[in-house]
Image (cartoon, grey):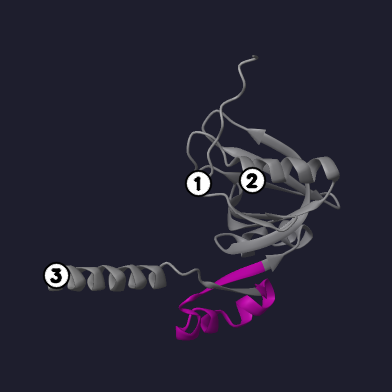
Amino acid sequence: MHVFRFTAYLFTLGLFLFLIGCAPKQIVRVDLDTYLTNQQEYQGKEYKNKKVVIAATLEDLSERYDAYRGKIIEVSAPVTYYGRSLFWTWYITLQKDGHILRCYEDRYRLYPDPLAVNAALSARTRGDEVTIRGTLYRDGLEMERLMYNGYNIDTNNPFRYRYPRSIGY
């Protein structure tokens, strides 16, 4: 009996420590100029358990693309295109004031997350802006989160099921 209590205690303690380790990091939003000026500060001990996200506009991204490359950024703009390629990659195009950015997701299971795709298509239909957070690479923004209409969707790890299409009954 005592062994069972001790094992249950250890299991509870292990679960608690696991959950603490999996806690999401606090997001710190900053603009590029502030980040570049205080870059050492944002990499110090104080920001160890925080995620620094650089807020950007499409205009600033197109003017200073190389300065943003490799960093986690957040950008908002209307969706003008949704597409899907053969190699398990789906993407959207953000466009505002003549500036265009391709945002893509290539790390998912067999099908893209239906909630993220529906949010992107709904925003495109309505002409609304979506907010995308991700890492900027040479070929565009690799999405991490898609935020629209109160939803904050993780595009990397969809846990929602994809229901099969109806077969015409």
Query: Residue at coordinates 50% horizontally, 68% vertically from top-left?
Result: 24
| Amino acid type, mark 2 | Ala
Q: State which mark lies toward you, 3 or 1.
A: 3
> Whole-percent x and y of residue 129?
79, 53
Q: Label 1, on which residue? A: 159
Q: Label 2, on which residue? A: 116
Dot placed on the residue nearer the N-terminal end, 2 or 3: 3
Q: Is residue 29 left or right of residue 49?
A: right
Quadrant placement of the N terminus: bottom left
> Whole-percent x and y of residue 60?
75, 63
Viewer-nearest residue: 35 or 160: 160
What is the magenta range? 30-54
Q: State which mark lies toward you, 1 or 2.
A: 1
User: What SS does tag 2 mark?
Assistant: helix
| Amino acid type, mark 3 | Met
Image quarter of residue 39: bottom right
Dot placed on the residue nearer the N-terminal end, 1 or 2: 2
Q: Is residue 53 magenta?
A: yes
> Whole-percent x and y of residue 117?
66, 41
Against 8, is 125 above or below?
above
The reply to whether callout 1 and callout 2 are in contact (CB within 8 Å) is: no
> Whole-percent x and y of residue 120?
71, 44
Q: Is residue 10 magenta?
A: no
Query: Residue at coordinates 60% horizontally, 38% vertically from top-left?
Result: 90
Q: Label 3, on which residue? A: 1
